[in-house]
Image: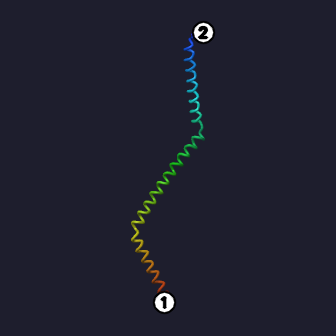
Amino acid sequence: MTSESASPDDAEQLRAQIEQTREHIGQTAEQLVAKADVKARAQAKVTDLTQRAKGTTSQLRQQGVTKGLDGARKYRIPVMIIAAGLLVTAAAVLVRARSRH
């Protein structure tokens, strides 16, 4: 088949196929360049890991606050009793020290 015997429709189809092939090759080349760009891929990985670490830190912090409040509520009365005992002891020591002078 020579160019003289090809119909105009066949020539248009060939041009369309060539254009599609060029676009496909261009996209493939862009994908290969992106894969070869180690610095950009590493930066993207660092960004992803940073975001995950921030999320985990926030979650752990919230869990710690919740557990801390639960612990404070659990031991509130015993701590108040001990604090009251310490205040009474301190007051007794002060009264006794002043009465000796």
Residue 16 vs 31, above or below: the answer is above
Note whether 97 is above or below 35 in the view shown.
below
Which structural element holds mark 2?
loop
Q: In percent of the image, x 42 and y 74: which residue is there?
A: 82
Identify the residue under disc 2: 4
Disc 2 to disc 1: CB gap under 8 Å: no
Secondary element at tag 1? helix
What amino acid is at disc 1? Ser
Give the mark nearer the N terminus: 2 vs 1.
2
How crowded pointer 2 is (Cα within 10 Å; few <14, some 14-19, many 20+) is rated as: few
Residue 96 drawn at (x, y percent)? 47, 87
44 sits to left or right of 82: right
Q: Vertically, is 40 above or below 32?
A: below
Residue position for label 1: 99
Q: Position of residue 59 (x, y in %)?
A: 47, 54
Task: Assess disc 1: are there few (<14), some (14-19) or many (≥20) residues with their C-alpha within 10 Å of its C-alpha.
Answer: few
Q: Residue 80's spot in the image, x, y percent?
A: 41, 73
